[in-house]
Every structure is written in structure tokens, then in C-alpha cells.
Amino acid sequence: MASEAELRLRERLSKLRSLPLLGGARLSGELERLQRQLDRMTAEPTDEEIWRSVELARHADRPYTLDYVARLLDDWFELHGDRGRADDGAMVTGLGKLDGRTVVLVGQQKGRDIQERTKRQFGMPYPEGYRKAMRAMELADRHGFPVISLVDTPGAYPGVAAEQHGQGGMIAQSQALMARLRVPTVACVIGEGGSGGAIAIALADRVLMQENAIYSVISPEGCAAILWRDASQAKKAAAAFKPDAAHCLELGVIDGIVPEPEPAAHADVDEAARLLGESLRDALDELDSFSGDELRRRRRAKFRSLGIFA
């Protein structure tokens, strides 16, 4: 598991790499120095270590969205339904106070036992779930409340009914709405961040990941089934595309890593919530100085730059 010093160093490296060169100044020397320091601190994670992140992200006792809501938000009031078709159990939305600041929270929720997992669709929302999230985000934009989203899903629900209800289009609409918001937005991957089901509520000003979370365009099993026609090669696939937090930070997919208690968040949920709360508060405080128009401009520029390498 990465130390806090290593996480800070990786975050600093990521920020330096994203800076433009100003007035002829060259950052290459500083980047090389930090990279050498990081190389000395830790070797490249082994396949086993990367797979361990996948296992911890999926751990049955890992805290879910409502576990953090209970520990971080006061005066929590949950919103239900999409005002059209149904109330999707996989998506949680509501209002609460984070240290006295009213926020709107959206997040995916898995289940602890088979009954709750069925009710929550194993954390995989239907289009109705994304419509519910959009309704909450529009409410936040109307009243000037920051938006916090907690991502924890293997992906959007893949069933025939979900496709008939417009799953792909609803994911796209959710992203478009988040790009237009004029309020601060902070997303954190707290477990699995799977494909479009995750990015639908993660197009935020600041995107964080807990230390043992994963974030990827496809599950390791799905990738293995496509590449090798054998889902049992999931560990090999995970080692290839590296969905762990440290590598996501290096790629610039996320903006920061939230530390977890040893050995992982499920071992001490209260401490995990405290660390998450600190990171969310710091991110919101950082965004307070920007106007709505500036937030929207910077957010759009940030996501348009992803995947562009010179």
C-alpha cells in the first residue's frame, strides 16, 4: 500500500505535468528530480499488488455511499424518484450539511445482503437513476449548492429494459449537465468506478479516488473476455490497464488520492470517513474562489484535455 508521502509525491508530479510552460520556464528538471525520488521510494507495483487494489475496491465490507453520508452529513434529507418512471435503488440523492455548508450529494449504493443487493441492483443504475441524479444536480445549480458525487459501481445496468429506457443517452445527458453546472463539483471514487456508469456522475471540477479504489473503462473480467476470450485472465488484464489510484493519478484521470486507514477503508470506517471528509472539504474550499462561469470554463477545458499527449 502506498504511503501518504508517496501519494503526495505522485499528486505533485501529476500537477506539474499538467502545467503549461510560462515565460520560457522549463519544468523538466523538477519533473525528473521528483520522478527519481518516486522511483527510489517505490518500484512499479506488481501484478499481485494491482489485483489487490481490485479486491479491496470490491470488498464486501467496504463502506458504501450511505455509510459515509451517516458519518459526514448533518440534516440529511434523501430525495427519491426521477419524477417520471421510478425510484432507482442503485442511485442515492439528497441534501445535507458538510460542516455547516449545504451540499447536494449523489452516489451509487450497493447492498450488504442478497435482499438489499437485489433492491440496489448491485450498485448498477437504470436510466431512472441517472435522471434522479440529474434532478438533484439541477436543484443544486438552481440554489447555489455544491455537488458531491460518490462513485461506486461496476457500471450502468446492462439489461435489455435499461437499454430500452435509453441507458446510453441518459449517461450522455448526465455528463452534459455536469459540464454546464455553475456550482463547485467534487467527485470521489470510493470503490469501483466502472465505465460510463461511473463517469456519468464524475464529470467534476475535482475528481478524487480513495487509495484502494479502482477506475476504468471496463472491468478486468470484461477486458479479459474480449482480449483472450477468458474471463479468468482478469488479473492479467488489470495488470495491463492499471485501474488503481496511483496510476490513474499519473495519467491525469484524477486530481488527487484520498488516503485510507490500514489496511483499507473497511478496517476502520470512521477513520476512512474522516479522511474522505477532509479531502472533500479541502476541494470545496479550493473551488470557492471561482465564479460559476469560470468553474464551467475550467471544467470543460479539463475534460477536453484528457487523452491528449504531446
Image (spheres, helix red, strand yellow):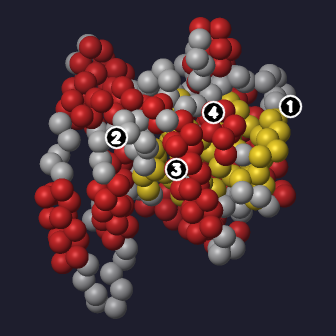
Q: Which mark is residue 255?
A: none
Question: Can residue 28 be spotted in the picture?
Answer: no
Count of residue discs? 4
Q: Secondary structure at mark 4?
A: helix
Give above or below for 162 relative to 198: above
Q: Position of residue 230 (x, y in %)?
A: 26, 13
Eye-nearest disc, 3 or 2:
3
Circles 4 and 3: CB atoms closer than 8 Å: no
Eye-nearest disc, 4 or 2:
4
Amino acid type of the residue that numbered disc 2 sits on in the rendered structure: Asp
Q: Residue at x 34, y 66 (%)?
A: 12
Amino acid type of the residue that numbered disc 1 sits on in the rendered structure: Arg
In the visual, does 15 lie left or right of 47?
right
Q: Secondary structure at mark 1?
A: loop
Within-10-Å neighbours for mark 3: few <14, some 14–19, many 20+: some
**Mark 4–mark 3 distance (CA, rounded to whole Å):** 14 Å
Within-10-Å neighbours for mark 2: few <14, some 14–19, many 20+: many
The residue indicated by pointer 1 is 83
The residue indicated by pointer 2 is 244
Q: Position of residue 100 (x, y in %)?
A: 77, 58
In the visual, does 293 lie left or right of 11?
right
In the visual, does 171 lie left or right of 255?
right
Quadrant of the frame with the C terminus: bottom left
Q: Reading the chain from its start, which is encountered first: label 3 or label 1? A: 1
Q: Reading the chain from its start, which is encountered first: label 4 or label 2? A: 4
Quadrant of the frame with the N terminus: top left
The residue indicated by pointer 3 is 275
Q: Reading the chain from its start, which is encountered first: label 4 or label 3? A: 4
**Mark 3–mark 1 distance (CA, rounded to whole Å):** 35 Å
Within-10-Å neighbours for mark 4: few <14, some 14–19, many 20+: some
**Mark 3–mark 2 distance (CA, rounded to whole Å):** 19 Å
Give above or below for 90 relative to 65: above
